[in-house]
Amino acid sequence: MKKHFKRLAHYNKWANERIYDAAATLDVEDYFADRRAFFRSVHGTLNHILAIDKLWFGRFTGNLYALPSFDVILHDNLVDLRAAREAFDDHIADVVHGLDESRIRGVFRWITTEGEPYASTLDRCLTQIFNHQTHHRGQVHTLLNQLTGEAPPIDFFLCMNDDFDEKDETQ
C-alpha cells in the first residue's frame, strides 16, 4: 500500500509542476481574475489546494496547521506560492516515504475543522487528500484551458511513464 501512496506523491509533484508552469504563462489579470470557480481564480484555487494539504499533513505529522478559512490566501503572488508548493510537495513525499504499512492501515484520529473528533484509517485519509488535490487541480486545468486554449496534459500514466523511478517504487 505504501508503494501506491509513493506513486501518488510523485504524481502530485509532477502534476503541480506542469500546472504551475502553465499558470506562469498567464498575464496577471487572467491569473487573478474571478472566473466563477469555487475558489474564484487560478490563484485562489492553487492557494486552497496548498492550504488543505497543510491542514491534512499537519494532522499526519502532529505539526498542526490552523486553517483560518477554506479560501485563505497563503501567498499573494505566484512566485511565492510556487516556492511554497514545491517545498510542500517535497514534504509530502518525505512524509509518505516515512510511513510504514501498519501505520497506513491503522486507525487515525483527528479533530475536524468544526471541532469534532473523527476517526478513520490513515489510508483513507491519504486517499482523500490525494483525491482533493486532483479534484481542484482539475479545476485549475479547466481554467487554464479556457484562458489559453491549451492546458498541459496531467494524466497519471504520463507521469508514471515519463520519469518515475521504478527502483524507488519497490522500497
Image (cartoon, grey):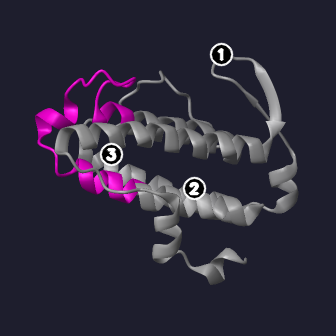
Q: Identity of the amino acid at label 2?
A: Ile
Q: Residue at x 59, y 42 (%)?
A: 131
Task: Indicate the position of residue 27 as horizontal and vertical percent values.
Answer: 11, 42
**The image quarter in which residue 46 lies:** top left
Task: Indicate the position of residue 44 as horizontal and vertical percent values.
Answer: 33, 31
Q: Identity of the amino acid at label 1?
A: Glu
Please give the residue where the numbered disc 3 appears in the rendered image: 81
* Residue 135 to residue 98: above or below: above
Please give the residue where the numbered disc 1 appears in the rendered image: 114
* Residue 84 to residue 164: above or below: above
Callout 3: helix, strand or loop? helix
Stretch of the chain drawn in magenta: 16-45
Callout 2: helix, strand or loop? helix
Q: Residue at x 25, y 45 (%)?
A: 78
Q: Are marks 1 and 3 in contact (CB under 8 Å)?
A: no
The image quadrant where one finds the C terminus is bottom right
In terms of sequence position, does the residue under pointer 2 or pointer 3 come before the other?
A: 3
* Residue 162 to residue 59: above or below: below
Residue 25 seen in this snapshot = yes
In terms of sequence position, does the residue under pointer 1 or pointer 3 come before the other?
A: 3
**The image quarter in which residue 59 lies:** top right
Residue 30 lies in the magenta-colored region: yes
Q: Foreground residue, 154 or 34? A: 154
Q: Residue at x 68, y 48 (%)?
A: 61
Task: Indicate the position of residue 72 as horizontal and vertical percent values.
Answer: 40, 26
Residue 80 lies in the magenta-colored region: no
Q: Residue at x 12, y 33 (%)?
A: 29
Label 3 environment density (alpha carbons within 10 Å; few <14, some 14–19, many ≥20): some
Task: Indicate the position of residue 23 as horizontal and vertical percent values.
Answer: 25, 48
Q: Which mark is residue 92?
A: 2
